[in-house]
């Protein structure tokens, strides 16, 4: 992508401390492009901007930040996309508070493709992560780009699924684009920069901070035609993304879970309030015109009846402890523990905190 020749002016305005996107957009509406804004007398700008922001406009701090951003943008695969660029994502122009500019690393053409946000708990269950990755892959195969927030758990699994299909994935960061958070996802972030897209509205070097992530969430939902929540507690930040999606006029989807699981309660609350219940990729694609599944057999409803035997037949789909399994199966604790170990090694059962176990659904091949 060819950079806007006036990029330095865009950056100079966007990097003023305390001058938010709303004020910057007001300046642009009033005076025109950034070069025209900067040509105005400070007294004229004072009607829109706070004195502290105007004082910072000509500071060394801002000048150095502009130089760093221009140097970063000059590296291969790096882009700064402004509101005036043809490459600015049209979907973000529909939201209430679009950013003035975006930092992007990777395949910027993904911003013009149809997308679905897939989000959920950082402390996901193994089954939740498996569902998110399988759904991400199926939806990517169907032509949707998977958008998420690079968090641990569901987000990371959804990104991996997206990368495995032609739709690929976009990771929207709550930090500067040159800051990887969490560090445990550093390798995944590198893979996304290579085959997908990293995206941020925050200046280079911005560290993770609590107030950044709700702002990030509005971009995750804003870039997509809909938002799917795979696992979420009632206090999960994923529900903020879902609410933003609803306010932006996007479709909201939620995957149900056990009535006993705290990580299902947020999804169940969304379904009660009108979100579409999702058991498979087909449930999502049926709501989005122009897409269809591609050779995908999804979650529990697609498993052949009678496929489970032995201890699995007594486990159900909720987390369960060893004592309960002993009672249900009429087996000793040693027998149950031995069978659970075998099933865990086979990828059919996962150990959960608190001495609980949960069976995992395998995809039908």
Image: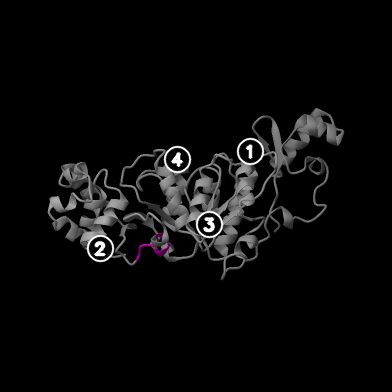
- What residue is shown with label 1? 262
Q: Secondary structure at mark 1?
A: helix
Q: Position of residue 26 (x, y in %)?
A: 27, 56
Residue bearing the label numbered 4: 182
Counting residues from the N terminus, which is met first, the one under dot 1 or under dot 3?
Answer: 3
Furthest residue toward front: 47
Which of the 4 image quarters holds residue 358? top right
Tell me if mark 2 has few (under 14), some (14-19) or many (20+) residues whose alpha carbon lies within 10 angstroms of its own. Answer: some
Query: Which numbered disc flags the more N-terminal residue, 3 or 4?
Result: 3
Residue 154 visible (yes or no):
yes
Residue 34 or residue 191, whichever sits in front: 34
Q: Which mark is on residue 162? A: 3
Along the line of sight, which residue is nearer the eye, 87 or 36? 36
Mark 3 nearby-residue class (10 Å; few <14, some 14–19, many ≥20) = many
Magenta stretch: includes residue 365:
no
Q: Earlier in the sequence, mark 2 or mark 1?
A: 2
Q: Are marks 2 and 1 in contact (CB under 8 Å)?
A: no
Mark 4 lies on a secondary structure that is loop
In the image, is residue 262 above or below residue 133?
above
Q: So how many labels did they put on this image?
A: 4
| x, y percent for residue 359 | 72, 43
Q: CA distance from mark 4 to mark 1?
A: 23 Å
Q: Residue 191: which numbered mark, if any? A: none
Q: CA distance from mark 3 to mark 4?
A: 19 Å
Residue 257: % across, % down: 67, 46
Q: Is residue 89 magenta?
A: yes
Of 75 and 116, nearer the camera is 116
Which residue lies under the disc numbered 2? 4
């Amino acid at each position: 992508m060819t950079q806007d020749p006036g990029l330095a002016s865009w950056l100079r305005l966007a990097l003023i401390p305390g001058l938010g996107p709303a004020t910057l957009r007001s300046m642009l509406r009033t005076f025109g492009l950034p070069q025209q804004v900067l040509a105005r007398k400070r007294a004229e700008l004072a009607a829109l901007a706070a004195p502290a922001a105007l004082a910072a406009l000509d500071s060394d701090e801002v000048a150095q930040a502009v130089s760093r951003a221009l140097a970063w943008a000059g590296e291969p695969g790096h882009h700064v996309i402004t509101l005036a660029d043809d490459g600015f994502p049209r979907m973000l122009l529909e939201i209430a508070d679009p950013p003035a500019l975006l930092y992007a690393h990777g395949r910027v053409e993904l911003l013009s493709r149809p997308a679905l946000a897939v989000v959920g708990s950082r402390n996901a269950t193994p089954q939740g992560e498996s569902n998110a990755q399988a759904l991400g892959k199926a939806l990517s195969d169907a032509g949707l780009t998977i958008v998420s927030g690079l968090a641990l758990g569901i987000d990371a699994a959804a990104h991996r699924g997206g990368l495995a299909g032609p739709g690929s994935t976009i990771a929207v960061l709550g930090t500067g684009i040159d800051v990887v958070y969490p560090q445990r996802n550093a390798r995944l972030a590198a893979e996304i920069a290579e085959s997908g897209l990293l995206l941020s509205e925050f200046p280079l070097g911005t560290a993770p901070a609590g107030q950044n992530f709700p702002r990030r969430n509005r971009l995750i939902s804003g870039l997509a035609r809909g938002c799917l929540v795979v696992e979420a507690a009632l206090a999960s930040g994923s529900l903020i993304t879902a609410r933003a999606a609803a306010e932006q006029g996007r479709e909201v989807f939620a995957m149900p879970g056990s009535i006993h699981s705290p990580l299902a309660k947020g999804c169940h609350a969304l379904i009660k309030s009108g979100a579409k219940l999702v058991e498979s990729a087909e449930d999502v694609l049926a709501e989005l015109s122009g897409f269809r599944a591609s050779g995908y057999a999804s979650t529990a409803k697609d498993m052949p009846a009678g496929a489970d035997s032995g201890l699995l037949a007594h486990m159900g789909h909720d987390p369960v402890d060893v004592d309960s399994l002993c009672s249900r199966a009429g087996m000793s604790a040693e027998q149950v523990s031995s069978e659970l170990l075998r099933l865990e090694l086979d990828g059919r059962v996962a150990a959960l905190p608190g001495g609980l176990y949960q069976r995992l659904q395998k995809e039908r091949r």
